[in-house]
Image (cartoon, grey):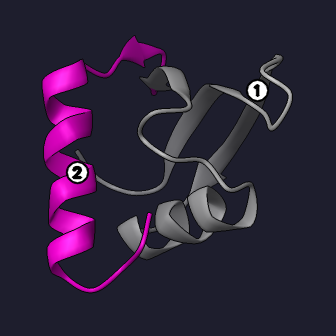
Amino acid sequence: MGYPLWIRLEYRNDVGRIVGFTGSIQSEAALIEILERYEITRERLVSVEINGKSYSPAKLDSFFQKAQIEGEEV
């Protein structure tokens, strides 16, 4: 999958309400920045779509594990 990508994130905010983010990202680092900015953790994510297609929970788990190994706290 090449960049840029359109992403749609649905996640629970601090009070448990489901909110969303839709935008274009240019790199994996940009996605990590968005997750940090909105304080989105793996546990808070409800759904993820990339270019209109659902992103599987297994791939999300793998992404978050990789980000932690590389020193990012996502």
The image shows residue 71, relative to residue 56, as above or below, that is: below
Mark 1 touches mark 2? (CB < 8 Å): no
Magenta-drawn stretch contains 67 = yes
Q: Residue at x 36, y 79 (%)?
A: 72
| Residue range (magenta) | 50-74
Amino acid on which the number 2 mark rests in the picture: Phe
In front: 22, or 12?
A: 12
Q: Residue at x 48, y 16 (%)?
A: 52
The disc, 1 or 2, on the residue closer to the chain's N-terminal end is 1
Q: Secondary structure at mark 2?
A: helix
Q: Classify mark 2: residues with Cα within 10 Å, few (<14), some (14-19) or many (20+).
A: some
Residue 26 visible in the displayed image: no
Give the Cα distance between marks 1 and 2.
19 Å
Residue 63's tag is: 2
User: In this figure, which residue is indicated by the disc labeled 1?
Assistant: 20
Image side of residue 11 versus residue 43, left or right: right
Which quarter of the figure has residue 56? Answer: top left
Amino acid on which the number 1 mark rests in the picture: Gly
Q: Residue at x 70, y 43 (%)?
A: 23
Image side of residue 18 versus residue 33, left or right: right
Residue 19 visible in the displayed image: yes
